[in-house]
Each structure stands twice: as structure tokens, then as C-alpha cells.
Amino acid sequence: MPFMKNRIASSVSVLVPIVAATIAAFPLNSSAGVEDTVWNAQRERAKELKKVNAKRLRDAGEKGDVAYFAVPAMSEVMRLDDTWPEDGELNGTVRCVLAKGEFESCSFQLFSFRDFDDVELKVDLPGLKNDIRVVKLWFQNGNGWVSYFDDTGLKLTPELLLHDENLIKVVKDKEPANYARVRKDGKDKYHWISAPKKADSYNSGFNQYDQGFYDADKLLPVSLEKDSFKQFFITVNADKNQKSGIYKGKVTVTRKGKTLATVPLSVRVLPFELPMPKGYLEPEKPYLHSCMGAMPNLGRLTAALGDAEKAKTYYLGRLKSLYEHSVFHAPYIYEGDFERQKWIVDSLRKIGFPLDVVICNPRVPWFALNFGGRMSWRNYYDSVVSARECREYYDKLLPGSTILCAHGDEQGTAFVTAHRELFREYEKQGIHMGCAGHDALLYKGGYAYSFMPLGTSPDAMISKTRPWREIGNTWLGFYAAQHTASENPQFVRRQHGLLGWLNGATMSYNYEFAIGSFNDRANVLYRPMVVSYADSKGLMETIQYAGFREACDDIRYATYLRQLADESIAKGDVDARLLAKKARMYLAMLNRDSVDLNLARLEMIEYILKMREALGK
């Protein structure tokens, strides 16, 4: 994609405070060659807190070998093995609420008073699809959880959601490091995947697409460490025809036939499906929820896997994963072999992706006018021809779809001025041009552009989008403040969800949906901006990937609330109209920067149920 290049952010948000202990100086780490200040502080803190946590639980009356807490799946809390769950409920019921067709996560933590291996967890939740995974703590660089900028040293960070916790080995003693397991012919080989960027000897040979690197299909037995917490995620899915109501279940924790704990589950399925997201200030406009680079590339996958049919299966699995995580506008259609593109479009339709608005390749010639100048007669002729051919191609491939095409990346005023005639030719063909960038795009071409991620933060969108909305023809999102990379699922949820939506955004299109790298210290200025990783079977689950799904689902709940309110005002009696205006008032008065998103979701559901009842639904 033209504007997929690393860029320096216009501003940086700090997600969570860094405790004073993490900035203390410690000796050099022999393997990294840098100060692992954060990890050393984490390690020293854990020595004290683990003992304190064990005593707190015994004082609370826990007499067994294992205790459990119900905790929010979406939380700002970075849950390490020594972090007391202040937001959790000891011996509480693990709960979640979801609409028909929705995927929703819930979570709990186990605390063990002894060292255990081969601990099995079995979910019994009749009537609902579910999947349980362990949250893997592993080393990221010193800015893990907090920022997308690189930092020295290592930091233990929760991120991966695994069925097999031993897929990644984490060494915490003299030479802290991550190792990836590759299994071939019944033998395991571990590859060092946390080498410092200047390690000349680093050549692990690790390839995430290697057929020996894969997660298990279901949760395997786990180990529990003495006086330590371990977190688990359960993702529940209700079919679109699921009967509404409350479903009860449990998670049984056993070792060698002995029950260590029984964790109760309660899931409520709501009596409605969620609509596709729409804008808040522009409620008739489809809200595009995606991320730059989310669409897989079939050609690259074929090269990586070395087999065309295997690549197609892998490709479809990635698309299905994106859809199930509400990355509904991931499709980016490339110009190229028509039959291959038709197979891709047919696959997207079959999975369920909305193709009413699609981002595509514009087939624009590059005129090398980055620093201004005038289009030559030949440039203009090429613009006319390419715009017409582009229209013909997409009429055949995507009839009836609104086509958005990107050209350039963070271009300045001279570039915009030089290309306005090109934009005119595409607009003449009903194809809408866009670009990621800053104010130069507005000042010199605001009338000619139709979509763009703005270089700003989502909380500033209300002022940034105002002139574009008044022009009246744009899809607008943000990027860079901040980029992806934070593992904090609740921050990812807020940033890509209600925060921008309530402030006038009509798209989520941040930079970027990165697959890998497994080495968080591989870059120089930025951390790898990872939303998900890949193994030889497909996309892997992470807590931030779950957060990205929650972001879109928040918008979908808010969209449905807004739609019901509009219907109530148009058709309802006086009580229904007043209830609808009260629901609108709720959205209008939300503290967008700091509202408890878990509570906001439940309050939106309450309004939705009341309005449905008032409308006789």
C-alpha cells in the first residue's frame, strides 16, 4: 500500500504510569549488552510481592492449593505473575454478555500455593461455542505495554494467547530471553528470538511459517508456579440463531484426577444481532473498521509456504480470523490477475465481509512530482486512461461497490497541488482518492480527497474532522498517536473504538496491522507494531487482537443504540421518544477519554433492551 512506511508520530500517548521501581539502574545483562532495568525491577519486586500475595489469600481464608479470581478480559492492568488483581473477584463467577453472532472474551486467574505441572483445564459450557487459552508472559523490549517506540532492555509482558504455553520458552535467570520451539521428526529445537539488534552473531534461522512451528488446536496441560498467578482467556461465540438467555457452565481445574478448583461461568446471550458499524455524527455513513496492512497477500504467502494450494487454505484462514475479530473492512483489492482477484472477492463474500465500501489499488501512474511542478500533457493523458481503466476493472470485479483508492503517503502541499487534475479524473469516474497525512491535504486538496487517516490522535478528531465533514465527502480516521504496538487491550479498544467514533471519526485505519516480528528488539526507532503473530497454521491470538475486536463491537452496540433511538423518536409514543432522547444524552455526555468501557457496554445494552421493549421488538 503506498502509504505503508514507518513514520514519526505527531504525538505520543502514555498509556499507564511506570512505577518508580522500573527506572532504577541495575547491572548490565551479559546476553543483551544493555541495561535490563525494567526486567530487573520486575524480578526484584516479584520476590516480595509473591510472598505478600500468598499471605493475603491465606488471611482471606483460602485453604486449598489453588485459588481463583474472576477478572475483566479487557483491562488496563498488566497482569504479571505477581500482580494482585485489584479489579478481580476472589471466588467470583466468570461472566460475559454477547449478542447473537458475536465473539466475546472473559477471563480468570489462578493462584497456586505449590508448584504443579500437567494441570488440565476443561470448559463445560453447554450450548455455546468456546475456546480457552493461557495468557503467555514473555519478554518484550523496555516499552512493552506502554508505547510503540523502541527502548533498551527487556520487560516481562502479557501478550500471546496460546493453547500450548511451551510453544515459546521464556528463560528468566542469568540470560533472560525468549525461544521459539520448532518441532520436526519428534524433536524440538528452540530458536533465540530476543537478540539485541546489534548482535552480529544473531542468526537463529527462525521462520514463523516453518511447518514445525505451530500452536496446538486446544488447550494443553499447563504448569502452575508456587505463589504465582496465571491468567486464562475464554472466548465465547453465539450463533446468529442462538437462543437468547443465560447459559451456565464451569471450568474444572485438575491434576492427575484431583480437582484443584472449579470456576463458575455465566454467559448471557442477548435477543438481537449487532448491525455493521455506522458513523456517530454521520449515522448513515458506513464506519470503516480496519487497520493498514490487515489484508493478507496471497502471492507472498505462496512464496513463504512454497505451495499454492496450501497458501490458499492459509489465506482463507487469515481472512476468517480477521472477520471474527471484527476487522470488517480489511479487504484491500489489488490490481492484477482478474481470476485470482475474483476468487478473493468471492471468498470475502462467502465469509461475510461487507463490500459496500472497499479500499482498492488505483492503478495510478507515478509522475515523480513529489516536490511540485505541473503535470505534462502526457501525465494528464495517462490520468484519463488509468482512471477509465480502473473504473472498468472494478465495475467488473466489484459491481455496485464504493471504491476508495490511496495515492501517496504524507504528501506535502506541492504534491497535492500537482496532482489535483489526476484526482479530478478519478472523481469523474466515481472513484474516491485518499492519502494518509496532515494539513497540507486539507489546505491544498480538501475538496478533491474523499478518505484519509489523519496524522492526529483519536481524542482530537472532533476538531480535525470538522472542516472535512463540512466539505461533505470524506471517510476520516487517525494514525500515529499512537501507532499499534501496545499490548494493553483496553487501550487498544478505547483508541480504535468509541474514543474516535464519538469524536467524529468515520473510520479506524491506524498504522499498522503487523504480523510478527517475534523479536521485539529487532528495530531501531520503533518496536515491531504487532497486532497478531503467525505460525504455520495461521494468525495467532493476542490480547491486543482481542482488544481490537472489542473496539469495533463497542461501536456496533453504540450504532444499534443510535438506530433504535432514531426509530423511537420517529415512531414511538411520548415515553419511547423521551427514552430515546435519554439514550442519545447518554452517548453525548460520556467522558470519552476515561469512561469505563466495560461499564459503558453494559449501560448501552440496558438502553437497547429498554428501547426494544418500548418498540415492541
Image (cartoon, rainbow, N blue to C red):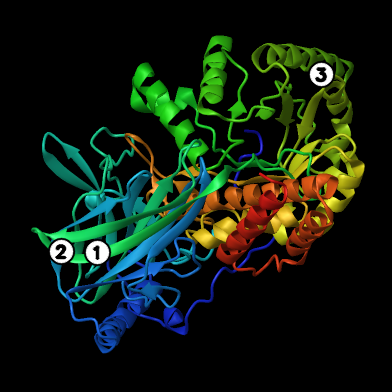
Identify the secondary structure beneath mark 2.
Answer: strand
Asked if residue 398 is positioned above or below residue 550 in the image, the reply reads above
As shown in the figure, which amino acid type bears the numbered disc 3?
Answer: Ser
Mark sitting on residue 259: 2
462 with respect to 195 (left or right): right
Mark sitting on residue 585: none
Which mark lies nearer to you, 1 or 3?
A: 1
Q: Earlier in the sequence, mark 1 or mark 3?
A: 1
- Residue 361 x/y as whole percent: 66, 25
What is the quadrant of residue 311 in the picture?
A: top left
Question: Callout 2 environment at 10 Å: few (<14), some (14 to 19), or many (20+)?
Answer: some
User: Badges 2 and 1: C-beta atoms under 8 Å apart?
Assistant: yes
* Residue located 26% across and 32% down the image: 211
Q: CA distance from mark 1 to mark 3?
A: 67 Å
155 with respect to 117 (left or right): right
Which mark lies nearer to you, 2 or 3?
A: 2
Residue at mark 3: 383
As shown in the figure, which amino acid type bears the numbered disc 1?
Answer: Thr
* Quadrant of the image containing the N terminus: top right
Asked if residue 361 is positioned above or below residue 192 in the image, the reply reads above
188 with respect to 419 (left or right): left
Q: Earlier in the sequence, mark 2 or mark 3?
A: 2
As shown in the figure, which amino acid type bears the numbered disc 2?
Answer: Thr
Number of dots carrying numbers: 3
* Residue located 50% across and 59% down the image: 489
393 or 288: nearer the viewer:
288
Residue at mark 1: 262
For this orientation, the residue located farthest to the left is 256
458 or 212: nearer the viewer:
458
- Residue 604 x/y as whole percent: 64, 58
